[in-house]
Amino acid sequence: MNGAETLVRTLLASDVRVCFANPGTSEMHFVAALDRHPELRCILCLFEGGVSGAADGYFRMTGQIAATLLHLAPGFGNAFANLHNARKAQSGVLNVMGDHADYHLRFEAPLKGDTVGISQAVSHWTRVCAEPGRVAGDAADAIQAARAKNGQIATLILPANMAWDPADGQAVAPPPPPLRRPSLDEVAAAARALRQPGAILLVDGPVLWSDLGLLAKRLTKAAGARLMHPFFAARFRRGAGAVQIERMAYRIEDNLTLMQGAPALVLCGTTRPAGFFAYPGRPSTPDDPDTRLIDLCSRDMDIAWTLQTLAEEIGEADLGPEDFGTLSLPAPPDGPVTLEKLGRSVAALMPEDAIIVDEGITASGHLAPALKQARGHDVLTITGGSIGFGLPNAVGAAVACPDRKVVVLEGDGSGMYTLQSLWTMAREGLDVTTVIFANRGYQILREELAAMGVNEVGRNASQMFDVEGPRLDWVALAKGHGVQAVRVEDMAGFNAAFAEAMEQRGPRLIEVLC
């Protein structure tokens, strides 16, 4: 027995069953311990951003934490962007970051880095194992922290000698502390505010995909209030049978219109909305200056209790067909490719209860109208805005839900950040269909340039916004990672390729020239 063995036994005793990994030399004793326990599923990702993105997707679809295995500060740095997305998604993630043996840190070894500093920049909880006999207890505390407050980023730093030195035993993570709740007076004040005509209840978290959505809809209907959710939500239900919750827009000017004149904005499970960026001459927040802002229940509080208590104060109205999404599936369109047509085809051909991982960026807005009328499905979005989220998040979602079809809507520029995830899909036989919108550039940057008031684009700007010369060949890239792929140039080709992918299991990629 050594420290690494006690760590693995603690993970299993605490019901952690999956580890997404990209290990190095300092983690070899942990790898050896994992090898002795095949009941803990280990999944190799060829880039650390794939590791963290997969752990995020796994939590979004299960509510259970996965472990990650990352190699020192540089490896953690590579994982940082998708840990940022996970933090914004309120996902619980347990990072195990290897480090040099503690006595080796006095030397300036090539991979030496500030493991504590880089962890604390994105983690809610960080601890360095200081004694091999305490590794199990430290791991149990890390698991508890990752599960606390509806999900947190917890990072346990494991020096190599803490893993290889003798140790014994295991620990079981205690349950997370009880969630905080607003006072009854605060709930009553929010109820009074929601009874004002035009008031808004803004919700997020499990309200968007669980039965809490029904409760929120009934109470807002009884109050005569509007029910809304942020544009970038970690997970929400859409399509036939989904509770109708108004989604905010991406652009600050659109949200200013949506919220204009609201007498009150009550927040439950979310934060005050803000623009994606600051823009010259525009406000940072979309709520009307005359709107009363009530921060009733933050993301790390007891959302279920708050809604139930709010419903007791307001009452609950009966829901009718108009409160749920309806099914409308016209035949897939043919002819030249347009984004609107692609949305209609995906909606028509996608099976019931699919999972859409949406990193279509500029394409997504054109696809959404048809997808609102598709069969019921879950949607995962890029909560933190750090691109390269889609492919690894789909890995985690597919591991979490092996019986559900996962569809990734992916821009060609953002997909390049983490395309190594295709290899993991192939190795694990994951049922993921990736649709690449090949517009040959970072279209979102072109639009943001205009939004910033810059209208003249020269050679340098154009060179930074396109991915031409050479063109990306996504069919070759996918096949090189072991994934079947096809390129389509018209709707007939897309319809045939997407229908075949929906009927077969395993990873597929469709590159659409658009």
Image (cartoon, rainbow, N blue to C red):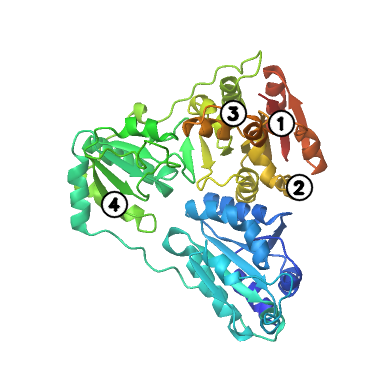
Above or below, 331 against 199 in this view is above
Q: Which residue is mark 2?
A: 423
**What's the residue type where badge 1 is placed?**
Ile
Q: Give the percent coordinates (x, y) of residue 409.
A: 61, 35
Graded by Cα atoms within 10 Å as few (under 14), some (14 to 19) or many (20 or more), the crowding at tag 2 reads many
Labels 3, 2: front one: 3
For label 3, the SS is loop
Residue 316 position by quadrant:
top left
Q: Give the residue drawn at x 20%, y 46%.
A: 191
**What's the residue type where badge 4 is placed?**
Asp
**The C terminus, quarter of image:** top right
The answer to which of marks 1 and 2 sits earlier in the sequence is 2
Q: Which residue is mark 3?
A: 457
**Residues under labels 3 and 2: Cα distance?**
37 Å
Labels 1, 4: front one: 4
**What's the residue type where badge 2 is placed?**
Trp
The answer to which of marks 3 and 1 sits earlier in the sequence is 3
**Residues under labels 1 and 2: Cα distance?**
16 Å
**What's the residue type where badge 3 is placed?**
Val
Q: Which residue is mark 1?
A: 510
The answer to which of marks 1 and 4 sits earlier in the sequence is 4
Labels 4, 2: front one: 4
